[in-house]
Structures are given as C-alpha cells and as structure tokens.
Amino acid sequence: MATNRTFTMIKPDAVGAGHTGAIIKMIEEAGFRIVAMKLTQLTPERAGQFYAVHKERPFYGELCAYMSSGPIVPMILEKDNAVADFRELIGNTDPKKAAEGTIRRLFAKDISANAIHGSDSDENAAIEGRFFFAETDMF
Ligand code: IDP
Ligand code: MG
C-alpha cells in the first residue's frame, strides 16, 4: 500500500447512532478519497486479532466485546500525509480531550465507544487495510 493511504473504521456506536453518513461527509470534505469501503461486523475473535497489540491492556476484553457488538464501516483512504492528517481529523482517543470540530469530539460517546479508528503509522495502515480488504478491492 502506498504511504499516502490510511485505514479507518467507523465503530459500532457511531454506526448504530446513524452517524455514518455525517462522518463520511467530513472525511471527504477534509480531502480524503475513499479507496475501499464496506459495512461488516467483527466476531469477538476477529476483534481480538485486530487489537492484538493491546492484549495486555486492562480494557482489552471490553474493547473486543464492544468492537464486535454491531456493524462497522471499514475504509481505506487516500490523501497526502494521510495517516497524520486523519489522526488530526478524528482527534484524541478520549472525546473529552479531543479538539473542537474533530470527529470524536462531535460523535464519540466515551473513551471506549469513540466513534472511529485511525491507523497510527503507514505500516499499520497497510496491515489493517489488508485485514479487511483483498488487494483487488483497493482501486
Ligand atoms: P487510538 O484509537 O486513539 O489509536 P489506542 O490507545 O490505540 O487509541 O486504543 C485503541 C482503542 O481502545 C481506542 O480507540 C478505544 O476504543 C479503546 N481504548 C483506549 N483506551 C481505553 C481506555 O482507557 N478504556 C477503554 N477503552 C480504551
Ligand atoms: Mg491506536
């Protein structure tokens, strides 16, 4: 995957609350092009694989249960400086600390159900994109 791509998923709280369209609109208006997208749901096992890096953290069980609790919308996005710019657009992990106008500040419920994921590096963006999409899905 090129380094001007990032991976995101709209999380179950935001999909369930009907914020999918508003969040996609913000993503596109911020200059990101959607390269791949679908609506799907993780099993607890697959949520555990996705967040394996956090398996020693105290919230890991809660996170896997939450992330498999309803539909999600994973996407691959393209833009110059995609990873860093997207992290800025979504804001701090804790919506109470997220800047005004960020997606998490606008739509997240709390630090766990925080509306949206954004990859933290080019390497993880590629790994996470491949977790949900075959190479042939990324046009
Ligand atoms: P990030 O999503 O902003 O990169 P990470 O530290 O990588 O934040 O954590 C991954 C996800 O785990 C968060 O988006 C959130 O859903 C959940 N999480 C992080 N910290 C906590 C916590 O202290 N309590 C509950 N859930 C948390
Ligand atoms: Mg992270």
Image (cartoon, rainbow, N blue to C red):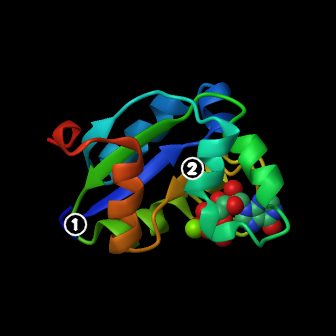
Give the residue pinned by disc 2.
116
Residue 51 occupies quadrant: bottom right
Q: Secondary structure at mark 1?
A: loop
What's the distance in space between the residues labelled 1 and 2, CA to CA? Answer: 19 Å
Q: Amino acid at mark 2?
A: Ile
Observer able to see residue 96: no
Dot 2 surroundings within 10 Å: few (below 14), some, or many (20 or more)? many
Q: Residue 9: x and y, percent?
A: 49, 45
Q: Amino acid at mark 1?
A: Asn
The quadrant of the rendering that contains the C terminus is: top left
Q: Residue at x 27, y 72 (%)?
A: 81
Question: Where 133 falls versus 20 (above or below)?
Answer: below
Question: Where 35 falls versus 114 (above or below)?
Answer: above
Give the residue pinned by disc 1.
4
Q: Residue 94: x and y, percent?
A: 73, 64
Q: Residue 106: x and y, percent?
A: 63, 48
Left or right of 95? Residue 128 is: left
Left or right of 2? Residue 72 is: right
Q: Residue at x 59, y 30 (%)?
A: 15
Tell which circle, 1 or 2, labels the residue nearer the N-terminal end. Answer: 1
Label 2 near ligand 1 (CB < 8 Å): no
